[in-house]
Image (cartoon, rainbow, N blue to C red):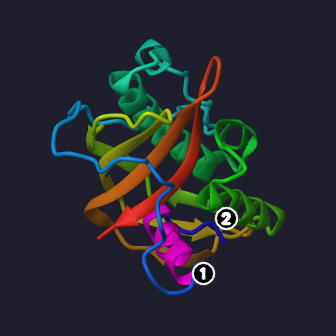
Amino acid sequence: MVAAVLASTTALVACSGGGTPSPPSLGTSPSATGSPSTTATGPSPSTSGTPSPPALPAAAQAMDAKGAGAFARYWFDVVNYTYHSGDTTLIRSLATSECQFCASFVRDTEKAKTQGRRTVGADVSVIAAVVPPQSSNGLFQVQALVNQAAGTEIDSLGNVVASLSPNARARIDVFLRRDKTNWRVRGVVPNA
């Protein structure tokens, strides 16, 4: 079953021993300053019925805090694309092997696709993304404030097998590392 992103991050907490999962070490404490962004994201509805992968925006290629924020917004667009297409190729390419949420999301998506299930709705939109100052080890933390729309999970016969509740103004931290040419997701942590 493809669970909602916010439900998936909650499930990740449950699977990691009950407490709040530890984010990857930044090496420094984040401060309240950073690069705020209030650009909402979300894929454009597809008129063909088959979603297209989102294009990486030019802003997400910058190797700085603004680039990290733009990449995190793009990553949520990729999550939405993955929900609706069942295609995990792109999200896999954006994750490091350390991203437990990414691995869980890919497993759940592939299982749902194998079972003939798909998600309708449940799109995540980013209200704001703040990037505290970067640590010296090159890891960026993007504090994303997101909304997730209500959705349904449909089986191969068109029957609703699960209803996904909306979630407003949830904070999800996305930890990014820049390799030689691309950003990669190292961790995704819900923040209560």
Q: Secondary structure at mark 2?
A: helix
Q: Amino acid at mark 2?
A: Ser
Q: Is residue 129 left or right of residue 53?
A: left
Relative to 107, is 68 above or below?
above
Name the residue: 43% across, 33% down: 136
Q: CA distance from mark 2 to mark 1?
A: 10 Å
Residue under label 1: 15
Up/down of 17 relative to 75, above or below: below
Label 2–label 1 contact, CB within 8 A? yes
161 sits to left or right of 111: left
Q: Earlier in the sequence, mark 2 or mark 1?
A: 1
Q: Residue at x 65, y 43 (%)?
A: 95
Tell me, for residue 104, which label it has, or none. Answer: 2
- Residue 152, percent across and down? 51, 68
> Quick one: SS at disc 1?
helix
Q: Position of residue 183 (x, y in %)?
A: 56, 29
**Residue 151 seen from this side:** yes
Identity, as a three-letter code, of the amino acid under mark 1 = Cys
- Local crowd at mark 1 within 10 Å, few (<14), some, or many (≥20)? few
Of 4 and 142, nearer the camera is 142
- The quadrant of the picture occupied by the C terminus is bottom left
Which labelled disc corresponds to residue 64?
none
Foreground: 164 or 18? 18
Q: Residue at x 58, y 47 (%)?
A: 186
Viewer-proximal residue among 66 and 37: 66
Among the 4 quarters of the image, the one containing residue 6? bottom left
User: Which of labels 2 and 1 is toward the front?
Assistant: 1
Which residues make up the magenta segment? 5-15
Q: Quadrant of the N terminus?
A: bottom right
Relative to 43, residue 156 above or below = below
Question: Is residue 43 among what the camera can see?
Answer: no
10 within the magenta span = yes
